[in-house]
Amino acid sequence: MNSYPKKRDKTIGNRKELLLEMFESALQNDMNYRGCTQSVLAALQEKMRIGSPEVFKAGSILAGGVARHGETCGALIGTLMAIGVICGRETLSAREEYEMAMEQGSLAYKLFKEKVGHTLCAEIHKIRFGKVYRLHIPEERQAFHEAGGHSRTGCPEVCGIAAVIAAEIILDLKKEGREN
């Protein structure tokens, strides 16, 4: 399982520095406040000015694999939401933008799966903690917290990885002039 370096190396350049700050911001957001989707979105909004209060608010119920039910990882969903804000279509008839957004979303999905090991929250729990926690059940959610679910190497690290993936894709889109 890959993770991004924790140290800053300012000699590499602004992009590398931004990505390290993005990783740390998303990680700290999840450690301090919980909510993987919003932890990723908040880092992107703060560091890259992506999104809006409405986009952030929409992420409220997507954490823990969609309303804490272990489905698609909320950190991945936050990544996809941010990419959609940058290159998604604004009308149903905007087919070209739709295709580009899907292409970028597919890239994010692939990178996330490679770096984290899975895209489903429950499966990520198995990888990181050796068992699945059903977060919609209060007792299991408490056990998840006690097992280190929100320690640095738990879900917060996944949020950091997701934020970096989003930032890399968005920076590339902007460099190529492909954002909406």
Image (cartoon, rainbow, N blue to C red):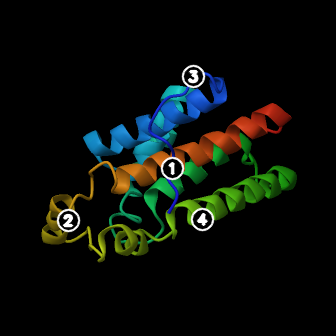
Left or right side of 116 for 66: left
Observer-side mark, 1 or 2, equals 1
Of badges 3 and 1, nearer the viewer stands 3
Residue at 57% over, 35% down: 19
Q: Position of residue 130 (x, y in %)?
A: 30, 75
Q: Which mark is residue 114?
A: 4
Q: Identify the element where label 1 is drawn.
A: helix
How far apart in space, not on screen, are marks 4 and 1 (Cα)? 11 Å
Which amino acid does the dot numbered 3 rest on? Lys
Q: Quadrant of residue 133?
A: bottom left
Q: Looking at the picture, which amino acid does disc 2 mark?
A: Arg
- Comparing labels 3 and 2, the label whose residue is closer to the camera: 3
User: Which residue is the site of mark 3?
Assistant: 10
Q: Nearer the viewer, residue 130 or 6?
A: 6
Pointer 1 residue:
161
Residue 52 visible, this angle: no
Type of residue at label 1?
Ile
Q: Are there few (<14), some (14-19), or many (20+) residues within 10 Å of tag 2?
A: some
